[in-house]
Every structure is written in C-alpha cells, then in structure tokens.
Amino acid sequence: MPHLPATSALVRGAALLAQGLLLACAAPAPAPAPAPAPAPRVTPSQAAPARTPDRPRDPHSFARPHQVVATHLDLALHVSFADSALDGVATYTLDRHDLSAPFVLDARGLQIHRVELAPRADDRNANTWSPARWTLGSAHPQLGAPLRVDLPETDAARVRIHYRARDAAGLQWLTAEQTAGAHPFLYSQSQPILARTWLPIQDSPGVRLTYDARVTVDRPLQPLMSADYRGLIDGRHSFVMDRPIPAYLLALAVGDLQRRELGPRTAVWAEPPTLDLAAAELRDLGDMLSAVERRYGPYAWGRYDVLILPPAFPYGGMENPVLTFATPTILAGDRSLISLIVHEIAHSWAGNLVTASAWRDLWLSEGITTYLERRILEDLYGRDRAEMEAELAVAALHQALRELPPADQRLVPELRGRDPDELSADIIYEKGALLIRALEETYGRDRLDPVLRAWFTAEDNAFTSRSTADFTLFLQTHLLGEAPLPGRAPLDLDAWLYAPGLPAGAPEPRAAASAEVEALAASWLQGQIPTTSLATDAWPPQRWLHFFGQLPAGLPAARLAELDRRYHFTDTGNHELLATWLLLAVRSGHDASPPVRARLRDFLTHVGRRKHILPIYSQLLQSDPDRARALYREARPRYHPIVQATLDPLLGAP
Ligand code: BES
Ligand code: ZN
C-alpha cells in the first residue's frame, strides 16, 4: 500500500549536545477538580516554568529559566527585502530567581551588535541603559549557541539586544515569482527550534512570555504576527500578544496581504489573487471554532484568523496563535481538506493553552490535537468522515511501526542528543490520538470530555507548559481511578507512553464505507469489474485514498493509466489526492506518460510541503535516481531551508 513516510526528517545522527540535568525541586501542585472553568489570565511571573523532579531540563535549549527567565518581549523589527535581512531590537523583562546567574538565551546564526541593561520599566531610572557584558558560546549546527548576558546583582531587570538575522533557517524570503501575486513575501516557521534563528530568545517550549512588536518594512507590504494587530502607530505596524506563549509560536509574515472578514472573530488573509478562493473555502471557520468551544471550553485568544501562504510553505498548517499559517494546497475548491484547519484550531487548546514542556512531550500537543480534530470533524461532518480520516492515518501508523526501530516507536522518545525535527509524525500524532481514543473507549466520552476540558482550562493549567508526567498525574487524579466501562480492561498507560508498538486492545477506527471500497478494489484488481463502474458518482477524496491504499506495489502502469483516463487524477485540484497519486505513479512507472511527467515536475517545483514531496523523492530515487536529482536541483531554490536540510542528504546539496 502506498505509504507516506513520517513527516520527520530522514537526517539521522546529528550529534546534539546531551545536557539532561535533572532538577531536584518541589513536587507538582495537586491537580484541580475537573470543572468547565473559563481560562484565566495569568500574570507573567506566574508563567515562570515550574520545576518538578520529573521535569528534566530541556536538552534543546541553552536557557536556564529556573535561574533567570524572560517574561515579556518587546520587539522592534525592520524587514529589509533589499538585502533579505531582519534588523531587530529585542528587549526582555526578566524574572530573576537566582541573582548570581546570567541571562542565557538561544541564538543561531545571529549577528549580535550590542547588549544593554536597564532597571524595571516602572523604575525612576527606567530609561538609563548601560552596556552589558555578553558572550556567544560555540555554535552547534542545530542548537546554535548560548548567548550569555552577565547581570549585576542588583537593578538590572531588562535586557536589550540589537541584532541582525540573515540566512535564518526559520525564515523564507520569496521573490514575487514564487508567490501568487506581484510582490515578494517573507514568512517565519519557528517550530520546533528555529525561533532562535530570527531572534535571540529562550527557545524552549517550557518558557512562556507575552510580547509586543513594532514592525517596519522597506516596501509598502503588510506585516502580520502571531498577535493582535493594532494597525499603524507612529508609522510602525503594532502587535500585542498579552497571553504568555512559548517561543515556537512567535511568527512573522510580510507580503501583499489582504484580509476578508468571515465572521465576528474570524478572517482570512491572503494575497489578492487567492483571497476569493480562500474565503470561500474557509467560510465555516466561525462554526469550526464554536464547535471546539462547545466541547473543550471557551476560545481563549480573542480573534482567530488564517493566513494563506505561498505553496513553498513546508507544512500543511502551523498553529501560530491568533493567526494560523496554512498552505494554499488545502484550497481544493470543495472544502474537502478543511480538516487541516480543524487541526490547527484545536491547537488553540492542545498545544497553545497547555504546551508540551519539552520536545519529547510533543505528543501532548500533536496527539491530543489530532484526537480533538477527529471529534470536531465528527461533530461537524458526521462520524463516517471522521472515521475515514482516522482509519487512513492508522494505516500509515501501522506502516510506520513496521519500519521504525523500537526506540522511535515510543510515544515519549528519548530526544537528548537528537534533533527534535526527527520525530515520527505517525507516532506522535496517531499513536498519541489513539491513546486518547483508548481512554474514550475505556471510560466513555461522558467521563473523558470533562477531563480534557479541565486539562485545558483549569486555572493552573491554562497558559502553562506541561510534561507527560504532569498529564499522567492529572489522569490518575481525574480518570484512571474510575471503573472502566463494562467489558473493558483498565488501560496500561505506561505501555502506551513508553513501550514500542501498540498495546493490545488499541482502538481500530473503521469507516462504514471501507469494506465496500476494499471489495471494489479487490474485484477491480482481479479484472472482475471495469474501471468505469468503480465510482458512479464522485467519491470523497478520503475514499479514493483508501482505494489507493489497496493497490499493490507491483501494479502495472497500464492499470493506473486506466484510472487516469476515467477519473483524471493527474489533473486533480485536490493536493492530498494528487500527492498520493503521483507517488503511485512513480512507483508503477505511470510517470513515464508525458502529462504525468509534466504534472510531477510542476508539483515538485511549486509545492514545498515536506510531508508530500519527501515520499515522492524517496520513491523516485529508487526508480530513477538521475531524474530525482535533476528535479531536486531545479526545485531546491524554492524550498524552505527546513526542507532543503531534509532533502540535501538524500538528493545532494548544490
Ligand atoms: N504544529 C504542527 C506543525 C509542526 C510540527 C511544525 C512539528 C514543526 C514541528 C502543525 O499543527 C501540524 O501538525 N501540521 C500538519 C497538519 C496536519 C496534521 C493536519 C502538517 O503540516 O502536515
Ligand atoms: Zn499539529
């Protein structure tokens, strides 16, 4: 069956620094009773990361937030398209728990010009800035370097860093030709550890801060950030994020962007040529948001907007608070790919309200979000639609489990010394979602839903960063003590979290239509029914994806050509379908046909979504390595640095 390999990079063995020191401190506070409490606002000092015995230090950040932690960022940015550079002044307000400790931030590839110190903003000497002593440690390719700022024992509560970011791996600068419109474009992608490539920051998901920003651009283009947009103030675009967020949710985009209101708190931003299509595709945005609220508590972030990026965007979507970034390839014209937006909306609860405290705990964000996504899909579009998506994803999970080494099959992997970008999406997303579904099947929705709601909204959980151990404790307190539903065995949480494979009795999503699709596929493969009578009316794309999943690896190209003649997959506007179809085409040799060949080239040179192009390149490398390398050489300049970093080792850097 066709298999989309994990989103994770194939790059292995980057010897990251191993620094997992255990912090010995107080036990975690007891978890509150599950009640649908509204999400409270926290003051910045409450946002300081809790230290618990079971929360080791984040091995992917040099920061020492238990000593000195930034609680607020004031950012002044100038975006220069003329020299593809960002000039910034980042001013941090600090909470100093250890007065003898320096302020340590993460920085990767940044030019640091100057660092200064001042007292608190409300001090009478607030505007007296003095030069600070600082050092930049030796650089690691992925982690960058620690930027250490010495602090005097007294006074200093703010640090101001003047810097420049050029060639940042977390930024993509696009020429006008690479966009939908007639202007250049810039956007950031900070997750997992790329925020540090465009600003010096304590780049750990366990550290949260509020921010405001003022942005100028060397062209008449619209900047947007993951924050409330306050318009032009004194000639600068102003943004405010007054809820504490982790660094990986800091985001910036600049382009010829226009906004279309979709509802009282929702809008879509896009380049003018894309705006109509985007607005039509996303017209249910407000309903989607309300659907999550009904189950999991009030939306805590004010507005929810979506920004449609150019097709080079390396992901499907990124849950930047207040402003989800999304690939234009979800604009299928029939709203069939909208589950991706449901996923990003759900992150406003799982991930953004309650954040995984380190990358090893990412499943808390992605796995729980994937579970919520399916629940919301079911609420909005019915059980069968949700089951179809779950079943497809679980098929990919089983494939991944056949291929991954046991250590990488754990939901909570050991990431010390490894790049967090290596995580297998199938494990983190789908095994994670199955775990929550196993809780649902064991205890029932009536008992699970309030527990999840409390996890997101309880006063001491909302706007905090949490570990898997915190979640385990929460479940033990609120759910695992209850009797399982009749006929159900208690769930082995440790096996789910720390063992490879899937525990016995793992849920098996199954859509009602699947059996019929499988039967049709079997008959078609045996030549018992003609291609023309496979689907009388239009099948939803998920059904076709399931059909594709039934096709054996050795299927002759001629049989795909038959399907193409009847159903025109090579011309489909549905990119989910197209990506899988092209993968099948390459696998069978159907890509020798000129229209398929042309479409493949067009796809690879325009679409930068790693999840779609990595499997195709991998397949092409097996069937026609010279062509794979030639296509990559042509397409590479359009790919995001993250995608280049994944593909270069396979296909060759220039
Ligand atoms: N937060 C992720 C994207 C991400 C994860 C970026 C880890 C970097 C590191 C986002 O919410 C996501 O999951 N995107 C998926 C969407 C899909 C699962 C619906 C994607 O881009 O494929
Ligand atoms: Zn996600």
Image: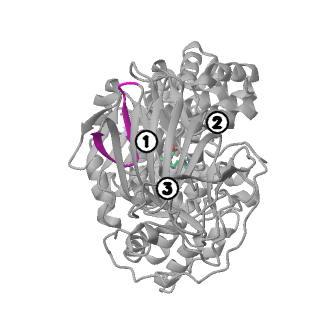
What's under tag 3, amino acid-wise? Answer: Tyr
Relative image position of residue 565 (x, y in whole percent): 49, 20
Residue 194 vertical placement versus 365 (above, below)? above
* Secondary structure type for disc 2: helix
Q: Residue furthest top?
A: 594
Residue receiving disc 1: 325
At 63% from the left and 25% from the top, the residue drawn is 636
Badge 1 crowding class, 10 Å Cα cut-off, few under 14, some 14 to 19, many 20 or more, is many
Query: Residue 550 lies in what quarter of the image?
Result: top right
First-in-chain label (2 vs 1): 1
* Secondary structure type for disc 3: strand
Residue 507 showing in the rendered view: no
Query: In the rendered structure, are the residues bearing label 2 and label 3 in contact, judged by CB atoms less than 8 Å apart?
Result: no
Residue receiving disc 2: 615
Query: Residue 298 lies in what quarter of the image?
Result: bottom left
What's under tag 1, amino acid-wise? Answer: Phe
Q: Which mark is residue 308?
A: none
Residue 460 vertical placement versus 558 (above, below)? below
Left or right of 464? Residue 263 is left
Mark 1 vs mark 3: in front = 3
Q: Please tell me whether the stretch drawn in magenta is mainly helix, strand or loop.
A: strand
Magenta-colored stretch includes residue 224: yes
> Magenta stretch?
219-233
- Quadrant of the snapshot with the C terminus: top right
Relative image position of residue 254 (x, y in whole percent): 42, 33
**Residue nearest the viewer, comparing 486 with 610:** 610
At 51% from the left and 23% from the top, the residue drawn is 564
Q: CA distance from mark 2 to mark 1?
A: 23 Å
Relative image position of residue 306 (x, y in whole percent): 36, 42
Residue receiving disc 3: 92
Badge 3 crowding class, 10 Å Cα cut-off, few under 14, some 14 to 19, many 20 or more, is many
Q: CA distance from mark 2 to mark 3?
A: 42 Å
